[in-house]
Image: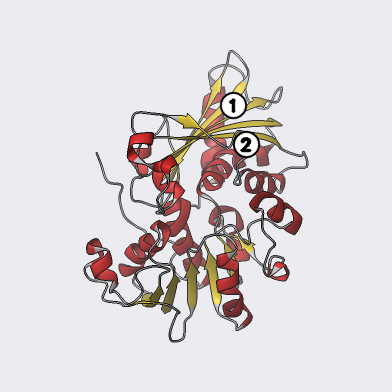
Amino acid sequence: MKVGIINVTGYAGVELARILHRHPDAEVTSVTGRSQVGQNLKDVFPHLAAADLPIEEELSGSFDVVFSALPHKASAEGVEPLVRDGVRVVDISADFRLKEVAEYESWYGVTHPCPDLIEDSVFGLTELHRAELQTANLVANPGCYSTCAILALAPAVKAGIIGPDIIVDGKSGVSGAGRGLALGTHFSEVNEAVSAYSLQGHRHMPEMVQDLDLLTSDKVRLTFIPHLIPMTRGILDACYANLKDGALPTGDGAQAALLDLYRDFYANDPFVRVVDKAPSTKHTLGNNDCIIYPTLDARTGRLVVIGCLDNLVKGAAGQAVQNMNVMFGLEETAGLQALALYP
């Protein structure tokens, strides 16, 4: 299967190249970059020493699937001709995630270049949209925060055990901001500090609401506050919601029933692990797992769910490859069976 990568020189793009290099059914045959055109991929990224490909200005050749790791708007402009020509595309940007064009334009401050393509796109949270992905021609890979939060909350929302008011406290490593240079991600600014940002609304929040609303007749009312943590990779979301009266057994059986609910929900999902104690982001470093720990605060009657993942793998490139596997009827785990790096 021939694969192209648009913008291989960003963090998500180079992670795609790393993962696809070991994929048994896929061959990357052309890559582009907005910088370093004309150089060889293995020279720009020495850890990809076996990837002997020139970085081109435009993709060359024919493809079964193309991944786009461009920023929003530029990505839609780049993939539009491919989609219209019948090439299957996985877009890692936000351009096709939100189904309401006006909402997208409000959150991202741009006019959508090809709004007619949104209707036929599939939100690429594999665990919740697997059936739709099998016939999808355009997949909108979710945001990293969104992936973690939706997976952490979906079983509880679907089962109707919580009320609609939800709080998500998110924490991300610095690579989530991308590879571009900026004062806000400068080492001296970030190191030994934790900071909250986007307090008036983060762009991943409408994705969370959109997908969770599909699971319930209640309208989700979600507050999401992200934080920047001085580490390279990782997302950790702490999610809080009030339990409905009688939603779970009382006493010692409540936690067991909650774990059973979550494990049953994800019984057929190879990359979601429901665990018995709170996970660390190190437990997902470099792999495609999302680890979830649901628990109860008996004093307040509140559900607490901790979710974590690697923002560049399950939160970006790994999930994109997982989506590709489903789209082409391959083993869902193909190319993604790496263990986490520890410590």
- Residue 233 in the image: x percent, y percent? 37, 44
- State the residue in front, 110 or 307: 110
- Residue 270 visible in image: no
Residue that protrudes farthest toward the bottom in the picture: 61
- State the residue in front, 88 or 48: 48
In the rendered image, the vertical position of residue 115 relative to residue 294, given as above or below: below
Question: Residues under labels 2 and 1: Cα distance?
Answer: 9 Å
Marks 2 and 1, the one that precedes in the sequence: 2
Colouring chosen for the image of the structure:
secondary structure
Q: What is the secondary structure assignment of the residue under circle 2?
A: helix
- Residue 156's disc number: 2
- Residue 97's disc number: none
- Residue 179 in the image: x percent, y percent? 39, 54
| Mark 1: few/some/many CA within 10 Å (<14, 14-19, 20+) | many
Q: Amino acid at mark 1?
A: Leu
Q: Residue at x 29, y 74 (%)?
A: 39
In the rendered image, the vertical position of residue 302 relative to residue 79, given as above or below: above
- Residue 220 visible in image: yes
Q: Amino acid at mark 2?
A: Ala
Q: Residue at x 60, y 68 (%)?
A: 76
- Residue 216 in the image: x percent, y percent? 73, 42
Q: Quadrant of the C terminus?
A: top left
Q: What is the secondary structure assignment of the residue under circle 1?
A: strand
Read off the residue under disc 1.
303
Q: Residue at x 30, y 77 (%)?
A: 53
Residue that protrudes farthest toward the top in the picture: 299
Q: Quadrant of the N terminus?
A: bottom left
- Residue 151 in the image: x percent, y percent? 55, 44
Residue that protrudes farthest toward the front in the picture: 183
**Which quadrant of the view contains residue 35?**
bottom left
**In the picture provided, is 97 more to the left or to the right than 228?**
right
Contact (CB < 8 A) between labels 2 and 1?
A: yes
